[in-house]
Each structure stands twice: as structure tokens, then as C-alpha cells.
Image (cartoon, rainbow, N blue to C red):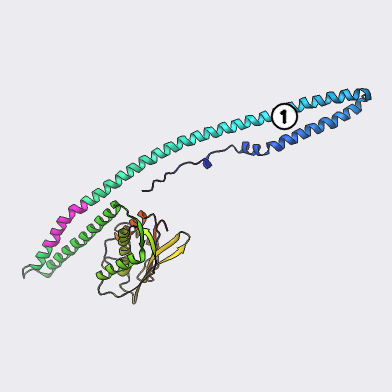
Amino acid sequence: MNDKRPSLSQTDLPTNGDAAESSQYVPARIALIYFAFGFCWIFFGDRLLDWLSVPPERMGQIQTAKGWLFVIGSSVLLYVLLRRHQQRDELAVNELLRSQTEVQRMNAELEARVAQRTQQLEAANRELESFAYAVSHDLRAPLRSLSGFSQILRESAPAGLDDKSLHYLQRIHEASQRMSNLIEDLLGLSRISRAELNARPASLSQIAAEAAAAVRERYPDREVELVIAPDMDVHGDIRLLRIAMENLLDNAWKYTAHANPARVTVGVEESTEGLVYYVQDNGVGFDMRYAGKLFAPFQRLHPESEFPGTGIGLVTVQRIIARHGGRVWVDAKPNLGATFYFTLSGE
């Protein structure tokens, strides 16, 4: 499970926009005010002395006094301006500290809530997996009995048993077999969810070749042209990746049953996400409006009578790819085949 938790960073802190803007222009403003004050003092002071017709012998004393008054006045002015700026800075700092304290409190609460929800989710997942495993395991024995006895009844039926009764027995046997296959797939999905991930360098090309060999054995009467790109090196759990490739290739084999010739390609391409691997076929495809159903358990886009299956294979693929930190998606068109893409972390 991903341990990343959402939190508020310092970049998300509220700031005092007016204070920040003022701080940027404070030196220029103080300099401008000081210049204006000095200019007005000198210009209008000299004009005032001329207007008062001050005698030349007293001009030196008055200029000295005016200079002292300018120093005192400018000092007071600078003190007032700087003190005002300091107060605004103190307010901004206090607001920032208050905001940081609030954010820290919110982060602590959020992390506590995420930790609690994570524990609850992990517990729920463990309970659900245990329940699925227990139910599936307990259903296997009665299903074997149902399948076996229905087969015995069909084979040892008396001569007087009509064809409809024989047909019903056959349907019971087939339904129990389908249920048994579904339980096996559910148990496999549960084991995949609980299995430890043993990631190491591996060749996806070799994994795909081995998976294809297993799929060919299931369809001995099928001729499928298979192309596997070489040198597809990955980092992942070889056993789980083989299960994923086997499900993808089995899916491709199944839905190219009516294609002539049937072609399946396993390859890799560059994208903005890095390396993207794909399994492509020229089978029946499907309408992309229903693509969201593909990775949900027991969802099927084609009748089981035409393309048998349990609807668990692609769910298994998605679970395995997610455990490798990647994602899987599909692109398809009716009667033009389908392409399943997936990524793996660390590529």
C-alpha cells in the first residue's frame, strides 16, 4: 500500500500580500520621502529667508539653525517611517507564525486521520481476502461432489432415461465445472494479493515466451502468429509478471478465434510516461464505451457461450501491475482487435 500521505507544505501557507508588497518597496519609499522632505526644506526655507529679507550678518546663524532643525526633523521622520515598517513586519511575522502553527496542527490531524483510515482499510482488506479465501475453499468440496455425482448419474443412467433428463444432468455438470473454475480464479486472485513481492531484474521477452507456450497448450487446435519484441528488460516479480502475461495472452488467443490469420504482438514503445509495454491482437475487439467494465470482477463484454471465461483474468492483471507501481489500460475497436498497455515502476 502506498504510504504517501497528503500534507500541507510551507508553500501552501497563507501570506500577507500587502505586507510582502510593501516590504519590497519600503527602501525606495523611504528614500523618496526623505528626498522630498529635504528638497522642500531647502527650497522653501531659502525662499522664506529671501522673503523675510534676513540681514547677511545673521544668515549664517539662521542657516545653522535650519540645518539642525533639518537633522532633527529628518531623524524624527525616518524613525516614524522605520517604526511603522517594523510594526508591519512584526504583524506579518506573527501572522506567518500563527499560520505555520495552524498548518502544523492541521497536518498532525490529517496524518492521524490518514493513519487511522489506512489501518481500517488494511483490516477490511485482510478480512475480505480471508472471507473470500475461506468461502472459496469451503465451496470446493461440495462442488467436486456435485460435479462427480452428476457425471456418474449421466454415465450410468438407465436406458429409459429421456434425453431431456440427460441434458439437465449435463448442464449441472457443466455449471459445476464453471463454478469450480471461478473459485480457482478467485483463490488465485486472493493469493496474488497476499503474496510477497520479490522484485528483481528480469526479461519480459522471456516471460512472455514462456507464458505463450503455456497458452498454446490450452488451444492446441489454434494457429496464432505471435511476435515478441526482444530485449524487454524489466524489474519485477517474475512469477507474478508471468501470471499477468499469461492472462493477457490467453485473452488475446481467446478473442482471435474468428480471425484469419490470428496475430498477437507483445512489444514496447516510448511515451511521456517512459516505457509502455503492450499486448496487441487482431480479434473481435469491443466498443470503448464499455472499457470501464473490463477490469471489474465478473464483467464480460461478450457472451460466455461464444467466448468462455470467468471474468477474473483482467482483474488479476490489474492487481499485479498495480503491485508493481504501474497501471494498465486498453484501446480497442469493434472487429479491429484490442491493445492492452501497461507500465511498470522503475523503468
* Residue 330 image position (x, y, % from top left): 39, 63
Is 138 within the magenta?
yes
Residue 135 visible, this angle: yes
Residue 306 visible, this angle: no
Which quadrant of the rendered structure holds the C terminus? bottom left
Is 222 within the magenta?
no
Where disc 1 sits, the SS reads: helix
Q: Main secondary structure of the magenta part?
A: helix
Q: Is residue 61 left or right of residue 34?
A: right
In this view, the residue in front, 335 or 213, is 213
Quadrant of the rendered image containing residue 160: bottom left
Which residue is farthest front?
Answer: 201
Q: Is residue 199 left or right of residue 107?
A: left
User: Who's the residue at 42% across and 62% down the image?
Assistant: 276
Residue behind mark 1: 78
Badge 1 density bin: few <14, some 14–19, many ≥20, Cα 10 Å: some
Quadrant of the rendered image containing residue 180: bottom left
User: Who's the residue at 36% across and 64% down the image?
Assistant: 204
Magenta range is 135-148
> In the rendered structure, which amino acid carries the disc numbered 1?
Leu
